[in-house]
Image: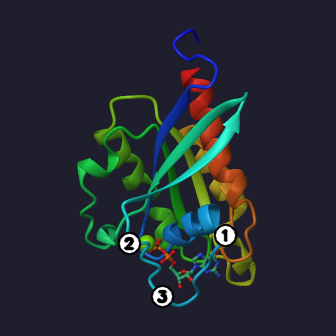
Amino acid sequence: DDDHEEGEEYLFKIVIIGDSAVGKSNLLSRYTRNEFNMHSKATIGVEFLTQSLDIDGKEVKAQIWDTAGQERFRAVTSAYYRGAVGALIVYDISRRTTFESVGRWLDEINTHSDTTVARMLVGNKCDLDDVRDVSVEEGKTLAEAERLFFMETSALDSTNVKKAFEMVILEIYNNVS
Ligand code: GDP
Ligand code: MG
């Protein structure tokens, strides 16, 4: 709209949430650095990483926040969510309990945000199809019921990682421009 002139920057805060070990940190490192870590806890060591992209000739900066493992203790603070306009809610397709937690993570976002949040349900580790514990249909059905975008991803082989982040970023852009 008129508030944003040509050449102006947009800055969007996006949070990644979901149970421990679903692949949140690796999704972020794959998207921003094209890196994957099989063994470590993949602690990024910073609160967020920034990825810039161009939409309609405007510079859009996505400031993507990763937890430092506090989700293990259900202790993600309100500061983490503050100002977020996008969220990736991640589960692991090979671990059903992580899918069953999605509702709780959605409650968390709703509790902590007072604005429209572009939300994408992400079924990560789709490379583990042979030990799949949640069907694609179940993911889709939940996403439709909760009005979320949905995508299965693999931080390991890169499937849909860029697509998932950029779909959220584009939706935020469409919400504000
Ligand atoms: P976080 O706790 O949600 O941040 O999860 P991490 O990113 O630390 O990943 C937890 C474990 O899952 C690590 O051993 C990763 O190597 C592994 N992992 C993450 N993403 C994938 C994936 O897409 N496929 C597979 N097979 N393993 C993954
Ligand atoms: Mg992590």
Could you tell me residue 161's position as x and y percent? 68, 60
Q: Earlier in the sequence, mark 3 or mark 1?
A: 1
Which disc, if any, is residue 45?
Answer: 2
Identify residue type, mark 2: Gly
Query: Which image quadrant shows ligand 2?
Result: bottom left
Quadrant location of residue 101?
A: bottom left
Residue at 60 percent of width and 46 percent of height = 52
Q: Which residue is mark 3?
A: 40
Does residue 144 show up?
Answer: no
Which sits earlier in the primary sequence, circle 2 or circle 1?
A: 1
Residues at marks 3 and 1, CA–CA distance in whole angstroms: 16 Å
Q: Which residue is at a point 55% across and 64% down the rendered structure image?
A: 28
Q: Nearer the viewer, mark 3 or mark 2?
A: 2
Q: Residue at x 34, y 69 (%)?
A: 68
| Residue 34: assigned label | 1
Q: Secondary structure at mark 2?
A: loop
